[in-house]
Amino acid sequence: MKRTKVIDALKCTDFGSEITVMGWVRSKRGSKGIFFIALNDGSTIKNIQIVGEDQNFDEETIKQITTGACLRVKGVLVESPAAGQASEIQAKEIEVFGTCDNTYPLQKKGASWEYLRTVAHMRPRTNTFGAVFRIRHNMAMAIHSYFHEHGFFYFHTPLITASDCEGAGNMFQVTTKNLYELKKDEQGKIDYSDDFFGQQVALTVSGQLEGELGATALGQIYTFGPTFRAENSNTPRHLAEFWMIEPEMAFYDKEDLMDLEEDFIKYCVRWALDNCRDDLEFLNKMVDNTLIERLEGVLKDSFVRLPYTKGVEILQEAIKGGRKFEFPCQWGDDLASEHERYLVEEYFKKPVIMTDYPKEIKAFYMKLNEDGRTMQGTDVLFPQIGEIIGGSVREESYDKLMAEIGRRGMETEKLEWYLDTRRWGSCPHAGFGLGFERLILFVTGMQNIRDVIPFPRTPKNCEF
Ligand code: 4AD
Ligand code: MG
């Protein structure tokens, strides 16, 4: 079907030429024998105006041009007399591809986010979600572009796996077994030998461990794929199915890692400012009027690099000074989101890379510091979001890694392949994971992670 996209039609100055556009009616109004349609085809946040004279169309067609209806319009591109738009189309032919009656759920303006989640199959047709999903696409392109330009290889790690990378045990099991007739051994344990994979497996919580295999062969790799966590966290920042980007680099130390985290995130934010201007301006006007300022702010300064121990001191000072927090904050505690946000939004007023966490609150694979109590983690904390990146230098010493695995009482059986990286030609290496939806939250100014992925999966919610 030959058509001009609305984004191109709006830029075209070939006035007098014939043009065909296709799209969905955002609104229609009319007076004195003339009607005006705002048509949108998703290529841009902007609509193109269609002008038609009633006398040139049959009554039935005009009646069918309602909000949400899908049209093909052929007409002449003309300079627009109306302010705020360069061109419009004088309609000569209108075909209604799909009518849309008044049961269409997106008729009223100002529907709540909660309501729009119940019509997630239709909400991409709204201005806001159109903007969010175009930006989401752009961020995916920015990510591939960054790593490709910097000599990283896109490495595909499996989604079905037998290992729990983060050791948190919140995995979704994958099985073809008949759950009504589970075979058990003498101790009452489920026997997986007749299951599809012959062992207990689950959806991945992180591609990192396999990513390390890639990095210790190809030098620098990244993954970018779906990740699954069965954590029962009903928060505006957690999904059960989210996308994660995990670069892993051989011969990187903590400084190299922090430099990469900062450079990478700034590149993505700059990409949004350079490539998503119309959508950002719309979101800045309608959703959060400090958005563009905040994005530009992140580019200006260097991120603060703050050891965890120092961070806890600052928080305890604040508590002494009367600042109230819901959760306590002692050395050794996992910082709550309110603590992270205090440091980022109130104390430093810029992004913070927090480093060197107590080993008790971090995963087994992190490199232990000489103090024996902290690990070389490097999480990036962002305004509004809290943790956006979780990263670390990896423990490359076989003996130290085995000691930590032993201390945690982990089974090594299923990890032998991973330990081989430390057995043969082990090398210093590091990596991080960026939560894609958390990045999109930041870049769009949206408040809830359910509103930056087309079809969110959260506890008790797996619709569409
Ligand atoms: O901090 P996490 O758990 O780190 C890892 O998985 C490491 N293996 C990454 C690595 O070093 N290769 O998760 C990384 C990031 C978090 O900082 C957060 O942005 C995001 O993933 N994330 C989630 N996003 C949405 N919903 C959830 N339930 C998330 N859990 C983590
Ligand atoms: Mg983390």
Image: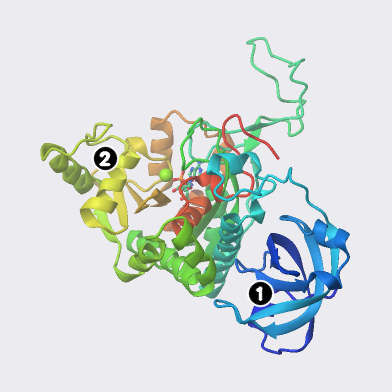
What residue is pinned by disc 2?
Answer: 373
Name which residue lies at 32% across and 37% down.
334
Q: Is residue 102 above or below residue 428?
A: above
Residue drawn 49% across the image and 33% down it: 234
**Image quadrant of residue 404?**
top left
Helix, strand or loop at disc 1? helix
Q: Which residue lies furthest to the left in this view?
A: 321
Residue nearest the viewer, comparing 5 with 415? 5
Q: Which amino acid does label 2 sit on?
A: Arg
- Tell how many labels: 2
Amino acid on which the number 1 mark rests in the picture: Ile
Q: Is mark 2 on a helix, strand or loop?
A: loop
Mark seen at residue 7: 1
Q: Vertical placement of 354 versus 183: above or below?
A: below
Q: How crowded is mark 2: few (under 14 residues within 10 Å), some or many (20 or more)?
A: few
Mark 2, mark 1: which one is toward the viewer? 1
**Comes first in the chain, label 2 or label 1:** 1
As measured in the structure, the alpha-carbon distance from the residue carrying label 2 to the one carrying label 1 is: 56 Å
Using the image as rendered, state which of residue 353 and residue 139 is in the foreground.
139
Q: Which residue is drawn at 22% across and 34% down?
A: 330
Q: How far across and how far down the image is residue 226, in percent?
A: 61, 48
Task: Using the image as rendered, state which of residue 423 and residue 406 is in the foreground.
Answer: 406
Instruction: Give coordinates of residue 399: x percent, y percent.
Output: 40, 43
Evaluate whether residue 358 shows in this view. Answer: no
